[in-house]
Image: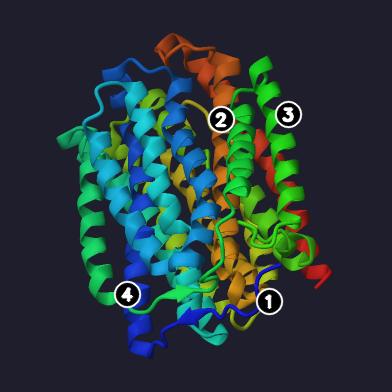
Amino acid sequence: MPDNNIKPTALPLNPRDARRGLFVLCLAAFLVPFMGSSLNLALPEISKEFSMNAVMLTWMATAYIISTAIFQIPFARVADIVGRRKVFMTGILFFVLSTVACAFAPNGHILILLRFVSGIGSAMVFGTNIAILTSLFPPEKRGYALGINAAVVYAALAAGPLFGGLLTHYFGWHSIFVFPALMGLIVFIMAHFMLKGEWTEARGQKFDILGSILYGVGLGTLIYGFTSLPGREGIILLLVGIVSLGLFGWYELHHRSPVFNLRLFTGNRVFTLSSLAALINYAATSGIAFMLSLYLQYIRGLDASHAGFILISQAVVQSGFSLYAGKLSNRIEPASLATAGMVIIVAGLAGLVFLGTATPYWMIVGLLVLLGVGFGIFSSPNTNVIMSSVDKKDYSAASAATGTMRLTGQAVSMGIAGMAISFHLGTNSITPDLYPQFMDSLRTTFSIFIGICIVGVFASRARVSKK
């Protein structure tokens, strides 16, 4: 058990400093989703330059997701010990340097490796971002602040396809990494002057090295094993991951200063179900943009900029609805809002299953708008439920757990897309003679997403009925 004689420290902040801190946190939250959604539009060009097949392209996102998921919880614990602001600032700088390096990658394998390294910096940022934001605002204003943060994330997702398509079209895929790196440098400078205060809820406690290793090995092999299914290697890695995570759970429950307080899950039903809902939601949705980006550019023959204009519709709607839903979650049961959002997502996914080679563009945009409404209503209320269900001392752990659920869900989603592509296309690149097989993989992917999301509706509903 933690030492109760160690007092958490934090500098008191006035409302002006809280607003300035929110501004910096939102700028940081903008960076990664902007680059990720931009990168989707650059994939065909990267594939052409480095001769990467469709399955290998999925690792552009998966490598980043795995590293961020592995390191997010350990860095959240480090932040509680040495200071959340310190880790946050270090993460931004690490992200800038590793992202610049991506622009100069000599081949596809090095680029994927650098994406893995870039995920370490992102883990520092997102392991502390929501925890700092939650510390800045009292409960009655927290939902609105979280809504603003979520709206910025979705604005980044909206800007990514638009500017990513333009950057790729006019300046090449290297600019997808250079531009966010320059933005990150600006955010680092602004954070130095505008993010006031420090939070060290576990100052003086020891860092759990063995627990961190068990967690990293377990989660890493679990995610990698899932993306390698149905091969023998994937099954073996899945078993290794399950055993490692089981040892991690036993060890943490008996450790005085665990890297993660598992009692958040064992003793907090609302936190557990809300985290499960987040995991399922991202597992059922994160691969949508990847598949549609390939569909629009390969099957429909659009260039990156025009494909970006279509994909932007979803994120624009997400941004507006998440801001409103965050504010509304201060007055209406946020778990009910999140459940309604997931139901809407099911409806949008059902429409995507019937995409064809000549589906009208207005219909595609309409389905993306519907998905945007669902995402916007789900995200910030669900995060509000999670962060409001824990004590102040557990903000970093809850923030990191939320991020880990998101990233694990994204990895599962990309794994499903990769498996569907592998099943229908094998290891071949996407060429005109294989377009029918790609369309089969697209429908398979979206059908699986629907099944997962339906399970998520029941998980989200359970916390409302059992509150």
Residue 417's disc is: 2
Q: Are marks 3 and 2 in contact (CB under 8 Å)?
A: no
Query: Closer to the camera, 370 or 38?
Result: 38
Q: Do the residues labelled 4 and 3 touch (CB within 8 Å)?
A: no
- Specify few, some or many for label 2: CA neighbours under 10 Å numbering under 14, 14-19, or 20 or more: many
Q: Residue under circle 3?
A: 239
Amino acid tagged 2:
Ala
In percent of the image, x 43 and y 68: which residue is there? Answer: 83
Q: Which of marks 4 and 1 is nearer the N terminus?
A: 4
Q: Could you tell me how far apart the alpha carbons at marks 1 and 2 are, in whole angstroms?
A: 34 Å
- Specify few, some or many for label 1: CA neighbours under 10 Å numbering under 14, 14-19, or 20 or more: few
Q: Residue under circle 1?
A: 333
Q: Earlier in the sequence, mark 1 or mark 3?
A: 3
Q: Could you tell me how far apart the alpha carbons at marks 3 and 2 are, in whole angstroms?
A: 22 Å
Residue 37 vs 466, above or below: the answer is above
**Quadrant containing the C terminus in the rendered view:** bottom right
Amino acid tagged 4:
Leu
Place of residue 252 in the rendered image (x, y in percent of width and height, measured from the top left): 71, 54
Q: Residue under circle 4?
A: 195
Place of residue 250 in the rendered image (x, y in percent of width and height, measured from the top left): 77, 49
Dot 3 lies on which element? helix
Residue 245 vs 442, above or below: the answer is below
Q: Earlier in the sequence, mark 4 or mark 3?
A: 4
Closer to viewer: mark 1 or mark 3? 3
Place of residue 106 in the rendered image (x, y in percent of width and height, measured from the top left): 24, 22
Is residue 289 in view? yes
Dot 2 lies on which element? helix
Closer to viewer: mark 4 or mark 1? 4
**Quadrant containing the N terminus in the rendered view:** bottom right
Q: Could you tell me how far apart the alpha carbons at marks 1 and 3 are, in whole angstroms?
A: 39 Å
Residue 196 located left or right of residue 80: left
Q: Earlier in the sequence, mark 4 or mark 2?
A: 4
